[in-house]
Image (cartoon, coloured by chain):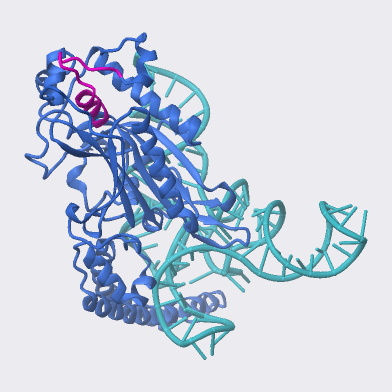
Chain colours: A blue, B cyan
Amino acid sequence: MLDINYIRENIETVRDKVASKGVAFDSDNFIKLDKERRFQITEIEKIKSEKNKIAKEIGVKARNKEDISDLKAQSIAFSEKIEKINKTLENLEIEFNDIILGIPNIIHESVPIGKNENDNLLIRTYGDKPEFDFKPLPHWELGENNGFLDIKRATKISGARFSLSTGTLAKLERELINLMLETHTVENGYKEVLPPFLVNDTSLIGTGNLPKFKEDLYKVEDNNLYLVPTAEVPLTNIHRDELLNEDELPIKYVAYTPCFRSEAGSHGKDIRGIIRQHQFNKVELLKFCLPENSHKELEALTNNAEQILKKLGLHYRVVLLCSGDTSFSSAKTYDIEVWMPERNGFLEISSCSNFESFQARRARIKYKNKNNKKDFLHTLNGSGLALGRTVAAIMENYQSADGKIRIPEILREKFNNKKYL
RNA sequence: GGAGAGGUGUCCGAGUGGCUUAAGGAGCACGCUUGGAAAGCGUGUGUGCUUGUGAAGGUACCGUGGGUUCAAAUCCCACCCUCUCCGCCA
């Protein structure tokens, strides 16, 4: 959510920036509604003020046992007027709020203008494509051939887009979770959090998942709870409706959670393997920081996520998303994409975003400086990393001619120094 | 799940229909005092919306949503949450 005053004062900028994200914003309608709404508010408050005066007068006269029937009648007349304006005003507010909540975040000045992923800007590349003297197999075939990825039985148990890993592949994922958590806590100074995996609707509104993206969520109907689509939701909401001290910032959290997504509207995309699942694991990084530091913190957060891929010796690139590819809530996003031999291309494995005050305003997270000045802080998050895709990347990049998967150096110690899974 | 108690500002906490403009305290900011500090004293200090060039006003907000009343933090109804005890449970 943007600041209403900011929209009013920068109406052209907002319209242009929003257009660069591919979202239409009817600025004339906004101005018209805003004007009408403010007029009605002034009207209703004038009458309320009169009514309050009369109520006080009645109080005094009643104590003195004076006649108050005239005043009562006046007050009732005011109430009727108020009721009438209130109906108009309620409708205006609903329409106005729909517009405000539908406006995406304003992109940062460093974000390139563009329509889709073709206009994204390559920032840097790490490592090289692995060379194979045989035709590399897709990870789902490697998993099945080795007997530790059983997608058929996962479908029997739960349905399409679920996976079941066993033995050393299951252990690989567990060791990766541990490697990520250890790296981010010990080396990068994040605090480990084990949050709830079910959250209420207020939390989801705070992060912007509701009401706009309800289709993507799994709901436990009887209890009015939702399965987390990402740890970003519980982590951001740790400080919802709170006032933090400037000297507490930045706050850095890292959490492992499973993530649940209905993947509505993604039919036919990435149907093979474990790239797009209804349930997947993820280690998430989240920061609360001062507004003036947030873009510096975004660079650091992206580096923290990259560090995992470096440790695993995986070839990747970092891409700055163009305006049209930047998500609704984000002001600036870097995607980290890992090399996948089977598709002969890169695959998103982490998305690191600076939301500036967009989420903080929705979730009412403020900070106070030494002079008691209060303002919304900035929030950032990024995957560090998505586990399923990391596992798939290791399988495909570390495969050998005999169909086995080599274990990345850094994890061999955990596997009794074995070379293969 | 059952019984009871409770939810008030940054925090603690008073407040059972109009003299509340939410008492009092703590914290914080500024000032006085001091060689310097502490203590002490004084002043200020909620949020949203809105009017106004500004100074300064108006309005709403006491867990959430409804209701009663000329008037609600206060009375009524529903729901959410916390605590204590009981039951169930890994």
Which of the two residues, A181 or A310, is positioned nearer the viewer here? A310
Q: Which residue is found at the position 60% from the left and 61% from the top?
A: A372
Q: Is residue A25 above or below residue A397?
A: below
Residue A177 painted magenta: no
Report the magenta residues as a range: A389-407
Residue A24 shown left or right of residue A58 in the figure: left
Which of the two residues, B38 or A272, is positioned nearer the viewer here? A272
Say which quarter of the image contains residue A316: top left
Question: Where does residue A127 sit, x and y in percent of width and height?
Answer: 30, 35
Residue A406 painted magenta: yes
The quadrant of the picture occupied by the C terminus of chain A is: top left
Residue most toward the left? A268
Question: Where does residue B78 sit, x and y in percent of width and height?
Answer: 31, 45
Q: Which residue is found at the position 41% from the left and 43% from the top?
A: A301
Which of the two residues, A174 or A141, is positioned nearer the viewer here? A141
Q: Which residue is found at the position 11% from the left and 18% from the top?
A: A153
The quadrant of the picture occupied by the N terminus of chain A is: bottom left
Say which quarter of the image contains residue A50: bottom left
Residue A76 shown left or right of residue A244 in the figure: left
Residue A70 appears in the picture as rendered:
yes
Question: Where does residue A130 sit, x and y in percent of width and height?
Answer: 22, 29
Residue A150 appears in the picture as rendered:
no
